[in-house]
Image: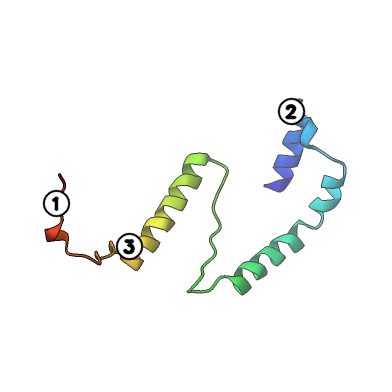
Amino acid sequence: EQAERLQARLDNPKKRWKFEPDDLKERKLWDAYQTAFQEALAACSTPECPWYVIPANHKWARDLAIAEIVAAALAEMNPQPPSANFDMAAQVVE
């Protein structure tokens, strides 16, 4: 996947500005980066504070993933409106 993106940057004149020769050096470290990424997620994500990998290639997919995560978290929390600290029935709007 990364190799395809780098090649697309070389092949497409509109994407060439994104390419740097150092990208090829960094490409050789891709597997190490992926391992470190997985280790960081495993070490930091907990049931109380989960981390999520959100796909960002398509905005609609990103937005859907975030909405689903937030909706599930809210459903689990079951938030309720706060109760009034005064007699609601005694209030009159004139």
Q: Is residue 42 above or below residue 20?
A: below
Q: In the image, what residue occupies the spot 46% across and 52% down?
A: 66
| Mark 2: amino acid | Asn
Q: Which residue is mark 3?
A: 75
Image quarter in which the C terminus is found: top left
- Which label number is shown at residue 25? none
User: For the residues carrying marks 1 and 3, which lies nearer the camera in this image?
Assistant: 1
| Residue 15 percent coordinates (x, y) | 74, 31
Few, some or many residues within 10 Å of mark 3 (<14, 14–19, 20+): few
**Disc with the residue nearer the chain's start (1 vs 3):** 3
Position of 28 with respect to 80 (left or right) is right
At mark 1, the secondary structure is: loop
Q: Which residue is mark 1?
A: 92
Q: Which residue is mark 2?
A: 12
Q: Which amino acid, mark 3?
A: Ala
The kind of residue tagged 1 is Val
